[in-house]
Amino acid sequence: MSEFRMPALGADMEDGTLVEWLRAPGDTIHRGDIIAVVETVKGAIEIECFENGILDKIVVSPGATVAVGDVLAQIKEEGRTDVVAPEPRTKPISESPDRAVSILSPSIAAPSLPIAAMSLPPRRISPAARKRAQQLGLDIETVQVGPGGVIGLAEVAAAQHLPQPSTAETPQPVKRGFQPDGMRRAIGAAMARSKREIPHYYVSSTLDLSLFTAWLEDANTKRSTQDRLLYAAPLIKAVAVALRSEPALNGVYVKDNYQPSKNVHVGVATALRGGGLIAPAIHDADTLTPDEAMARLRELIPRVRAGRIRGSEMTDPTITLSILGEGTADSLHPVIYPPQVAIIGCGAMRERPWVVDGAITVRRVMTVTVAGDHRVSDGRSAARFLNRLDKILQEPQQL
Amino acid sequence: MTEIRTISYREAIREALREALLSDPRVFLMGEDVGRYGGAFACSKGLIDEFGEERIRDTPLAESGFTGAGIGAALGGMRPIVEVMTVNFSLLCIDQIVNNAATLRHMSGGQFSVPLVIRMATGAGHQLAAQHSHSLENWYAHVPGLRVVAPATVADARGMLRKALDDPDPVIMFEHTALYNAVGDLPTTSDLTVDINHAKVRRGGRDASIITYGGSLPKALEAANKLSGEGISCEVIDLRSLRPLDMETVLASVARTHRAVIVDEGWRTGSLAAEISAQIAERALYDLDAPVERVCSAEVPIPYARHLELAALPSVDGIAAAVKKALRQ
Amino acid sequence: MTNDELKELVRKTLFDVAPDLEGEEIISDETFADQFDIDSMDFLNFVIGLHKATGVEIPEKDYAQVATLKTCVAYLESRMKP
């Protein structure tokens, strides 16, 4: 028997409210399954389970406030003999609940979401309907309710013939609306703390991305519209691969101790319309093809903008990448999100005069700035990283 | 070459009694008015003339006494059929049934068995008022050591008695008074005995399972008929055996239709319908598209006035409405 | 499809991509990006949505031509089968 405890999900987060259990006692659960939704000052967060087993007993009911480290449920193990520590997950950068984990992830909710979660009517789903939906691979939460506010077999049958949303099987948690002010305050607190505690240094390079953009344009003409790549996707991969050789930039710094990470989980800074910023992780970005990275982005960004983020996406980034985007500015000097030790900021792609083989020509360039934690690395690490990144981006077909 | 005979339920009981008396010298019938009067419900008419006073025994108005005597006779190697006029009067001999008949095998460590059949009329609908309108089948179905059956068709009325007599342990057979005049078909084969262990699907259907027994079966079938005119296809299950319950048949049906409506003339609270509902919830929850519906008697002593009595008992319309509720229509 | 219907379709596609914009007035000759903080991911989803709804494939080099409501409608109209 092991205990599923309330994980720490962000800086300054001492407690949250359990909103909903998405699985029930008796259910078989696997590592990575989303099993509960917790409301924090930063938004509604889907909590993933960190082990395989059978959900045995729910200790905390919806509506209860839980502090970080509190036991939420008990999980019976299915014949596993390895010890599962009461940590939220067993990856190298795990935080145990009693450590002060300062993850600066501002609140998630897009303030202008039309869905007022408080007034969502109760959705009653018959057991047979749930079972049928599961058999059909339908997301029961997307099925329209029928008479009496019930989703029964008839409703599932009707939904079967409708086009399904293209997102993965993400259960839709109960949404809560949040104030933009709250989010702004949270971001403010996090950034202030970062600047207070982390001695930042900055190194930047302007990279010639003409080859890269040419390759991308060509790649996209060969793809159908829905498979098109945004440059962010191969760029994320390139950054992740380059980071593999600079361990001083990819890891977490907790309690005066730096732990470099074996994996590269790139937090992608995502702006929320109307204000607000969040950087959910794309896991193992160095192992993805550009298409896979694009698929992850396509699933992640809309979901996060709609206010649904998973616990592991908030706690797992080992590095953050912030891309300003088209028509913005030349360069970005970003602020590191603790407990990470570096952040990479990209300005807009610009056409600039460039020297090639002693002559002036026009190239598409982008200024990439690395901010590093001077307790862990110095300018040379950042410079090496930028050089490596440059080399990778000159051979985009290898991505 | 089988030829269908059409007889009444009452006739079927009488035939079954006669056949038992003819084939097994250990069998005898005892109860109030079973002999000279021919039975309170005319089920033993003429039998005393054929079999004599020793085998068709009129008893005093003393349920506890004559039930006890029946238990004694069974212990002594006979195969008595004790007729308790109605389940209402069985309350006077319930101690004999529950504390002696049901327990002697257990308490004697298997040394004794009580191969007793008790027949009781049951149910309401004849304006016999509060004390004479009970449906207490569930009280007996509650007790380990007893078998309880409820023939609802002419064929079952004809065929269950022999099997009940063959059972080495006590069997209580409930005959709903509203069924005595019902007519039905019997094949003219030599062996008309029927299985007493299983429920039967009386009508196949897709949209809902109506689960019932005894006097409520005709109402359930009529409701199913009515609903089929509205495009709703109901499966009707006749439980036949109330202890033990054939839940396998019930659960298989619910797995197909996803909706269960239980019709039980007993009062709703603590009814047999409640037991079946609990078992469905325990064993078929994930097949259900709607909560289990129960159509039972209202929580009142059964009224005397006809319109009130009808209002208190399960009705065809009530059953149809419950099916529609389960279908959310 | 009439011009008005096409306009409505473009609006609907945009709102599908950015549901929080539902109900907003779209200025016909300002770019979506300027009016609404639409980024490249949103725009790509928008283009995909238009492709699904109209069958018109919009290559990357034509993105500038569909950047405002007015020009987008004109672009689609000229390429949609009558």
Image (cartoon, rainbow, N blue to C red):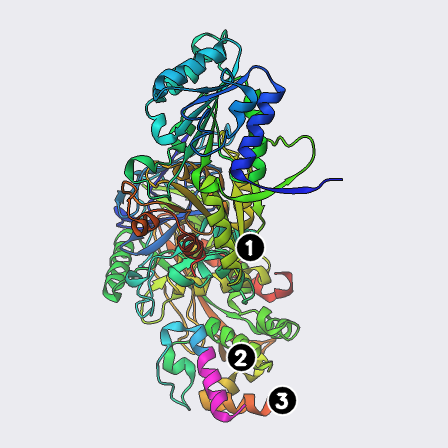
Disc number placed over residue A137 in the picture, else none: 1
The reply to whether label 2 and label 1 mark residues of one chain is: no
Query: Which chain does tag 3 point to?
Result: C
Quote the CA–CA distance across marks 2 and 1: 27 Å
Does the rendering let one see residue A137? yes
Locate residue B137, reporting x and y percent.
Answer: 41, 32
Q: Is residue A99 left or right of residue A237?
A: left
Residue drawn at x 52%, y 92% is C2
**Residues at marks 3 and 2, CA–CA distance in whole angstroms:** 14 Å
Magenta residues, start to end: C1-13
Name the spot of residue A45 as percent of width and height, x first. 36, 53
Q: Which residue is mark 3?
A: C81
Amino acid type assigned to the residue bearing label 1 in the image: Gly
Residue beneath the point at 32% across and 23% down: B92
> Residue B58 lies in magenta, yes or no?
no
Magenta highlight: main SS? helix
The residue that disc 2 covers is C50
Mark 3, other Cα within 10 Å: few <14 / some 14–19 / many ≥20: few
Kind of residue at badge 3: Lys
Residue B134 horizontal side relative to residue A215, left or right: left
Q: Secondary structure at mark 3?
A: loop
Q: Nearer the viewer, residue B229 or A263?
A: B229
